[in-house]
């Protein structure tokens, strides 16, 4: 977050003629939502289709997707990665490669996305940290080495590592509007020493003229990132589940021709213009699509109809006749589609894309209810629409209390939800935030059922329970909970129904702690002389007692979410920050120093971060930056 992605996007918009030069780097044009402008962060991925002149002979058609940096919205980055050919990875020269940067870079590698590295805020190294040329170059080399290590660990065929000498690393100041890479350095003769001298002499504005950022970044995209044709050869068949793709489909994708059969991938759901309905971002892999065309959805296994086709540039939505191979645009479908769907000209058996790799899960929840009773009936449908378009956002109706529960990856995501509902004309009341917790087993056990003669139980962490070829998986969920049926002599279909319903309910509300359960497998098997189990009611009693006893004997304990955080403060505020973290019962894992900036790595309970923003800023006179690196569920203290 706050490494400069949207500010850089302004300069690309300017290069494509969508933004006047006087506004470059100031308006954050792709942050069009009120909350984005108010908070100074990107919440929604925004797309802009630009025609950028590269030289007298070539113009590049660029589909730019500006993605959020805040961890609450990292699912939107995952959805964007499925649609693109290459990525511009921004790193703050002072903050360095953050954990969130590493996470999304790993996602990009998994999607076979070629990166170029852009190191932003070089001006801060000069003016704030006062590093000399040698110190700046050392810092740059450290960042390049970190990014290269991540790439090497997850390298794919066709990957080109970031390399300054080959042009795929840029040094920039998005705020001041200049950038330099090896191509521009050769052309202008400018060096890092010249850039330092420009700042020291107060002539940094000249750099914007001699090294215009929009032009520099456009050139590196054109030179170093693959075209749709090249990218699709690199990415496919790797994105197919189990790499299984019929030869004719793979050939069509590799040819990337508008004359081929229509093949497309869907991205995030989004509002198209002022339409009240949702459409999807779409990447065309082959052929062309226009309004009225029909395709087969590999996810829903149904035919869908294209009802609208548009290209988007920031806030401008333009109806177009068609989208063709290599294009990224938006379409409305009937019925609607979710992100990550593969659209094909006809039905193919067992042909689908790998699931999009979301790295987030809900960790906080609020109960919500409409202030106006007339909104009660339409609220669930609207929430479903919003959840379908928002990775990491889930809703659940609590049958015990009658409450509607909204669960999100962070409080910011839930705050935005309430604002979105108000924008749709629904005012809601909400409870204070509740931290989600999970009961997790620790040991594997093999026991006889405590109340049912001849029934045997195998239970424990899911990775410790194997599934034999004769076993039946009766139920499994996204939290790695499974109910298995081993040897079976007397279980009737009614019994199995009662077992599955009981297990499903128990995973939502543990009989021991009333928390959710995760990573728990229960396997029930019969001996040859077992007492018969032949009714729905017997299935309920049998499974209830098995779950209760298994959780006790596997040593199941409650885990709660903790943030791994990185906090950057000037050295003079380090003592005050350490005292505040200790007051919040944080575990400080490491403290390092980079040019007068102390970098604190800590683990802290999510409840202890609810009011942290205002307190941290007050303690440091506003001179603090922190990032939520990841969430880990740890045993409740």
Image (cartoon, rainbow, N blue to C red):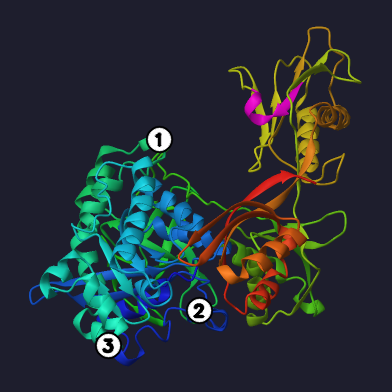
Between discs 1 and 2, the one toward the N terminus: 1
Residue farthest to the bottom, as pictured: 22
Write down the region rendered in magenta: 458-465
Mark 3 and mark 2 in contact (Cβ < 8 Å)?
A: no
Q: Which mark is residue 162?
A: none
Between discs 1 and 3, the one toward the N terminus: 3
Between discs 2 and 3, the one toward the N terminus: 3
| Label 2 crowd (10 A; few <14 / some 14-19 / many >=20) | few
Q: Which mark is residue 242?
A: 1
Q: Quadrant of residue 139?
A: bottom left
**At numbered mark 1, what does the secondary structure look like: helix, strand or loop?**
helix
**At numbered mark 3, what does the secondary structure look like: helix, strand or loop?**
loop
Does 632 appear above or below 33? above
Relative depth, front residue between 58 and 576: 576
Q: Is residue 82 left or right of residue 360?
A: left
Q: Is residue 441 visible?
A: yes
Q: CA distance from mark 2 to mark 3?
A: 48 Å
| Label 3 crowd (10 A; few <14 / some 14-19 / many >=20) | few
Mark 2 and mark 1 in contact (Cβ < 8 Å)?
A: no
Residue name at image x 27 percent, y 74 percent: 179
| Label 1 crowd (10 A; few <14 / some 14-19 / many >=20) | few
Q: CA distance from mark 1 to mark 3?
A: 56 Å
Q: Which mark is residue 275?
A: 2
Residue name at image x 64 percent, y 20 percent: 471
Residue name at image x 16 percent, y 70 percent: 185
Relative depth, front residue between 175 and 539: 175
**At numbered mark 2, what does the secondary structure look like: helix, strand or loop?**
loop
Q: Quadrant of residue 443?
A: top right
């Amino acid at each position: 977050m706050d490494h400069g992605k949207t500010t850089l996007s302004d300069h690309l918009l300017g290069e494509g003629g969508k933004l006047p030069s006087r506004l470059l780097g100031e308006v954050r044009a792709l942050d069009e939502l009120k909350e984005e402008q108010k908070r100074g962060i990107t919440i929604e991925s925004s797309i802009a289709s630009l025609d950028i002149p590269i030289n007298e002979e070539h113009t590049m058609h660029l589909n730019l997707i500006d993605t959020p940096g805040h961890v609450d919205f990292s699912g939107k980055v995952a959805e964007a990665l499925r649609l693109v050919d290459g990525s511009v990875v921004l790193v703050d020269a002072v903050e360095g490669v953050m954990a969130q940067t590493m996470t999304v870079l790993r996602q990009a590698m998994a999607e076979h996305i070629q990166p170029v590295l852009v190191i932003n805020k070089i001006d801060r190294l000069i003016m704030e940290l006062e590093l000399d040329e040698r110190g700046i170059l050392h810092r740059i080399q450290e960042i390049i080495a970190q990014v290269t290590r991540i790439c090497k660990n997850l390298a794919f065929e066709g990957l080109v590592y970031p390399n300054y000498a080959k042009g795929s690393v840029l040094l920039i100041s998005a705020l001041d509007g200049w950038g330099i890479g090896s191509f521009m350095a050769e052309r202008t003769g400018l060096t890092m020493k010249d850039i330092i001298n420009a700042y020291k002499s107060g002539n940094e504005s000249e750099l914007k003229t001699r090294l215009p950022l929009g032009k520099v970044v456009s050139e590196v995209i054109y030179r170093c990132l693959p075209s749709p044709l090249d990218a699709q050869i690199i990415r496919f068949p790797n994105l197919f589940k189990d790499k299984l793709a019929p030869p004719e489909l793979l050939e069509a994708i590799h040819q990337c021709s508008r004359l081929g059969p229509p093949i497309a991938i869907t991205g995030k759901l989004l509002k198209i213009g002022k339409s009240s309905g949702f459409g999807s971002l779409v990447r065309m892999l082959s052929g062309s699509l226009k309004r009225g065309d029909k395709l087969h959805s590999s996810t829903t296994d149904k035919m869908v109809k294209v009802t609208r086709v548009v290209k988007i540039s920031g806030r401008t939505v333009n109806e177009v006749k068609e989208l063709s191979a290599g294009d990224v645009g938006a379409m409305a479908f009937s019925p609607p589609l979710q992100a990550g769907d593969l659209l094909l000209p006809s039905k193919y058996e067992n042909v689908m894309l790998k699931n999009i790799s979301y790295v987030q899960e809900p960790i906080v929840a609020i109960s919500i209810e409409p202030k106006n009773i007339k909104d009660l009936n339409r609220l669930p449908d609207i929430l479903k629409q919003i959840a379908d378009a928002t990775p990491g956002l889930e809703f659940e109706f609590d049958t015990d209390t009658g409450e509607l529960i909204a669960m999100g990856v962070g409080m910011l995501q839930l705050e935005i939800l309430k604002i979105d509902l108000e924008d749709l004309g629904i005012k809601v009341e909400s409870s204070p935030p509740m931290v989600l917790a999970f009961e997790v087993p620790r040991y594997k056990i093999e026991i006889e059922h405590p109340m049912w003669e001849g029934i045997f139980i195998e239970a424990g962490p899911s990775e410790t329970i194997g599934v034999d070829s004769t076993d039946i998986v009766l139920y499994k969920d996204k939290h790695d909970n499974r109910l298995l049926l081993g040897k079976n002599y007397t279980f009737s279909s009614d019994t199995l129904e009662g077992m599955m319903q009981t297990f499903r309910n128990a995973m939502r509300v543990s009989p021991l702690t009333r928390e959710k359960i995760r990573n728990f497998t229960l396997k029930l098997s019969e001996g040859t002389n077992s007492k018969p189990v032949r009714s729905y009611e017997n299935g309920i009693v049998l499974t209830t007692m098995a779950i209760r006893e298994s959780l006790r004997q596997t040593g199941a304990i409650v885990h709660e979410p903790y943030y791994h955080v990185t906090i950057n403060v000037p050295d003079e505020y380090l003592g005050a920050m350490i005292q505040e973290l200790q007051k919040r019962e944080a575990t400080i894992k490491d403290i390092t120093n980079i040019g007068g900036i102390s970098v604190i790595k800590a683990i802290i309970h999510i409840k202890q971060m609810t009011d942290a923003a205002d307190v941290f800023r007050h303690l440091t006179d506003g001179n603090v930056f922190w990032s939520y690196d990841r969430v880990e569920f740890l045993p409740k203290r």
